Image (cartoon, grey):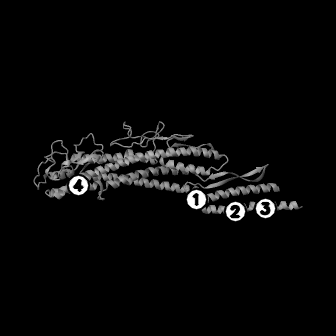
């Protein structure tokens, strides 16, 4: 090797070592940066006329595992869906209340039964009459509040779908731009930082809808849903969804009214929980659709069935001889008798009969004397009160959409409905915990593979320092030799 070639080799070594030092320092500096993937320098040998002439930088590699990243994203999408469903059930269960809670709908049932029982023993007591009127009114209000809670959650889920769609479409636009920038650097530049940013955007999308990545030349990628619908292929194919704003009682997806929107890309239907070949199965959007189209409708239908049971129980003319045939009983559909063809939304319209409501010109004494009474009856007469109590406590066939079979008293029916919801919450929590454990394990595995070990990077810096010193020593030696030669 000539002095010139030795000097060239040492200079190339210094350049390579300097680049490696930059990369190692960057790894250490970004050890805790979310989405950062450890870099390493890819180095090759310079060969001229069959002789080694030093080293050169071939590129920068990112320590990524495509398969592991794909599994982690899929697990994250499943976790996101499970978490939304679990939170929905938890909120419904908390507000509905369980038999042991002392609050919520079941507690209102118990309060009403207790008030009617005590009043039947002491029918002449004005205090117990008022307590009875307040109890049945409180029970009706509980139905109204529970229905409002369900409707609000349904509307919130619909709005969340719309926000998620906007987020995905915006992220797809950013990916399209990043694709172009990465292509511009892929030939002779370091695109690792842009690839990290693209990875973060992909993580954002994959949590909302499950996706597949198709690698292309020059560092570009295409994106499809798991079912194969293109979202990015050079151009962006945006998601389409129309928020409802207001959701009427009983509204269902594809009921012909177009009140609830599905999810589309062009003409392809991606709506979760449908039978289409492209329906999404995981991700936050799937979770919100499940809440909007399955969980809340089932909850509201159950409430309506319980409300219908209350109205029906107290509409029998044998309970109250003073009440005319066909007239509303103790509980009403917004003041009217029950219309079996108009059950949807009944829980929101449930009202006590105005005849016993002092705020509507009624009197609590009519619990004892009868809804149609025009005069004060015998103070100790508990006949109608006993009939009301029997109607409340007798076992009737469980109504349709309650999820129960068999005969139940009013309180037993409420307890059964609460238990069904509680069981659903427990199952949803179990799914969420299992999904989270798998996602966390995959995230840890990915971090172990592509994360930064600062101790190892510090050791690399020591080796880099030694390599730099060795190359510098070669240059100094060549310089000394040239000086000697010049002096000869």
Local crowd size for mark 2, using a 10 Å CA cut-off: few (<14), some (14–19), many (≥20): some
Left or right of 471? Residue 99 is left
The disc, 2 or 1, on the residue closer to the chain's N-terminal end is: 1
Q: Within the image, what quadrant is residue 450 found in?
A: bottom right
Q: Secondary structure at mark 2?
A: helix
Q: Mark 2 and mark 1: span between their CA atoms?
A: 21 Å
Mark closer to the observer (4, 2): 4
The disc, 4 or 1, on the residue closer to the chain's N-terminal end is: 1
The C terminus lies in quadrant: bottom right
Q: Which residue is mark 4?
A: 135
The disc, 3 or 2, on the residue closer to the chain's N-terminal end is: 2
Q: Which residue is mark 1?
A: 31
Q: Which residue is mark 2?
A: 465
User: Are the residues flagged by discs 4 and 3 in contact, CB closer than 8 Å?
Assistant: no
- In percent of the image, x 62 and y 43: which residue is there? 217
Q: Secondary structure at mark 4?
A: helix
Q: Which residue is mark 3?
A: 476
User: Are the residues flagged by discs 2 and 1 in contact, CB closer than 8 Å?
Assistant: no
Mark closer to the observer (4, 1): 4
The disc, 1 or 3, on the residue closer to the chain's N-terminal end is: 1
Q: Secondary structure at mark 3?
A: helix
Q: Mark 1 and mark 3: span between their CA atoms?
A: 36 Å
Q: Residue furthest left?
A: 378
Q: Position of residue 103 (x, y in %)?
A: 29, 57
Local crowd size for mark 3, using a 10 Å CA cut-off: few (<14), some (14–19), many (≥20): some
Q: Residue furthest right?
A: 488
Left or right of 234? Residue 266 is left
Q: Mark 4 and mark 3: span between their CA atoms?
A: 97 Å
Left or right of 248? Residue 118 is left
- In percent of the image, x 18 and y 58: which residue is there? 128
Q: Is residue 176 visible?
A: yes
- Above or below: residue 368 compared with residue 481: above
């Amino acid at each position: 090797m000539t002095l010139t070639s030795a000097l060239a080799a040492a200079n190339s070594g210094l350049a390579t070592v300097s680049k490696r030092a930059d990369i190692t320092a960057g790894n250490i500096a970004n050890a805790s940066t979310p989405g950062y993937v450890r870099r390493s320098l890819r180095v090759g040998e310079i060969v001229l006329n069959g002789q080694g002439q030093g080293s050169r930088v071939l590129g920068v590699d990112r320590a990524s595992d495509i398969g592991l990243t794909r599994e982690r994203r899929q697990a994250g999408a499943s976790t996101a869906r499970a978490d939304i469903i679990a939170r929905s059930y938890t909120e419904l269960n908390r507000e509905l209340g369980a038999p042991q809670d002392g609050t919520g709908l079941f507690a209102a049932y118990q309060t009403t039964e207790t008030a009617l029982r005590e009043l039947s023993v002491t029918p002449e007591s004005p205090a117990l009459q008022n307590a009875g009127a307040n109890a049945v009114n409180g029970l009706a209000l509980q139905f109204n509040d529970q229905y409002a809670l369900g409707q609000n959650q349904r509307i919130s889920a619909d709005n969340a779908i719309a926000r998620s769609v906007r987020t995905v479409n915006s992220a797809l636009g950013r990916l399209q731009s990043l694709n172009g920038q990465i292509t511009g650097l892929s030939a002779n530049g370091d695109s690792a930082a842009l690839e990290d940013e693209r990875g973060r955007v992909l993580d954002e999308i994959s949590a909302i809808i499950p996706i597949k990545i198709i690698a292309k030349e020059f560092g570009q990628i295409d994106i499809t849903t798991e079912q194969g619908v293109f979202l990015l292929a050079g151009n962006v194919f945006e998601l389409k969804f129309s928020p409802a704003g207001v959701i009427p009682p009983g509204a269902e997806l594809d009921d012909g009214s177009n009140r609830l929107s599905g999810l589309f890309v062009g003409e392809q239907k991606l709506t979760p929980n449908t039978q289409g070949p492209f329906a999404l199965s995981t991700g936050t959007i799937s979770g919100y659709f499940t809440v909007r189209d399955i969980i809340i409708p089932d909850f509201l239908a159950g409430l309506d069935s319980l409300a219908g049971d209350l109205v029906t129980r107290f509409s029998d003319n044998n309970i109250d001889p003073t009440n005319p045939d066909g007239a509303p009983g103790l509980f009403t559909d917004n003041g009217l008798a029950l219309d079996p063809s108009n059950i949807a939304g009944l829980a929101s319209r449930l009202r006590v009969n105005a005849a016993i409501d002092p705020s509507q010109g009624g009197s609590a004494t009519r619990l004892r004397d009868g809804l149609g009474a025009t005069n004060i009856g015998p103070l100790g007469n508990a006949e109608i009160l006993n009939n009301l109590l029997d109607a409340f406590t007798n076992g009737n066939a469980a109504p349709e959409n309650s999820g129960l079979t068999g005969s139940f008293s009013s309180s037993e029916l409420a307890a059964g409905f609460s238990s069904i919801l509680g069981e659903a919450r427990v199952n949803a929590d179990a799914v969420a915990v299992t999904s989270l454990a798998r996602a966390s394990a995959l995230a840890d595995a990915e971090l172990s593979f592509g994360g930064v070990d600062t101790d190892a990077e510090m050791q690399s810096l020591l080796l880099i320092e030694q390599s730099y010193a060795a190359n510098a020593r070669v240059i100094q030696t060549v310089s000394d030799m040239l000086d000697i030669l010049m002096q000869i």
